Amino acid sequence: MTEIPDLVVEVISPDSRRYDHETKKHDYERYGVQEYWLVDADERSFTLYRREGERFVPVLAAGERLPSSIIAGFELELTPIRSLF
């Protein structure tokens, strides 16, 4: 039996942008992943999708932090990530 991860983090490369945003997102959603994080250095963006029911919904940052529902008490600070771009 294959275990499904609760959280998947992807760093997107230019060649995989569409694949990560569409195909992988759909696959992870279908198999029950709870959170899917996408880091896109070229687009200078960070996207967090969280499962609500059977679907992923994008989570908007409250200021400079994105809270995880999977890692209790964890909030991703976006300022250091944005400074890398």
Image (tube, rainbow, N blue to C red):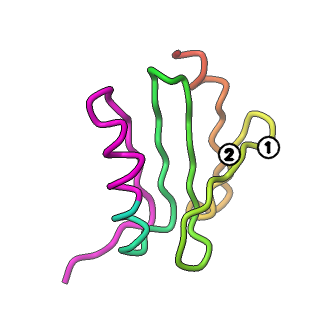
Q: Residue at x 73, y 43 (%)?
A: 61
In the image, taking residue 31 as reference, residue 66 lies left or right, namely right
Name the one closer to the observer, 41 or 75. 41
What amino acid is at disc 2?
Leu
Who's the residue at 46% across and 23% down the image? 41
Relative to 53, 36 lies left or right: left
Q: What residue appears at the point 33 percent right and 55 percent down from the top-left corner?
A: 23
Q: Position of residue 76 (x, y in %)?
A: 62, 41
Magenta stretch bounds: 1-25
Looking at the image, residue 36 lies above or below residue 63: below
Q: Label 1: how many residues lie within 10 Å, few (<14), some (14-19) or many (20+)?
A: few
Q: Is residue 14 magenta?
A: yes
Image point (71%, 47%), residue name = 60
Alpha carbon of mark 1 to alpha carbon of mark 2: how far?
7 Å
Dot 2: what SS? strand
Disc 1 marks which amino acid? Ala
Task: Bin the neighbour count of mark 2 within 10 Å (Cα to Cα): few under 14, some 14-19, many 20 and up.
Answer: some
Left or right side of 40 for 3: left
The quadrant holding residue 30 is: bottom left
Location of residue 10 in the rendering, given as x and y in whole percent from the top left corner: 38, 43
Q: Are marks 1 and 2 in contact (CB under 8 Å)?
A: yes
Check the image and name the residue furthest to the right: 63
- Quickly name the residue at label 2: 66
Task: Specify the quadrant of the image occupied by residue 77.
Answer: top right
Secondary element under disc 1, as helix, strand or loop, is loop
Q: Is residue 64 above or below residue 72?
A: above
Residue 51, how many percent across, how many down?
56, 68
Quadrant of the frame with the N terminus: bottom left
Which numbered tag is attached to residue 62? 1
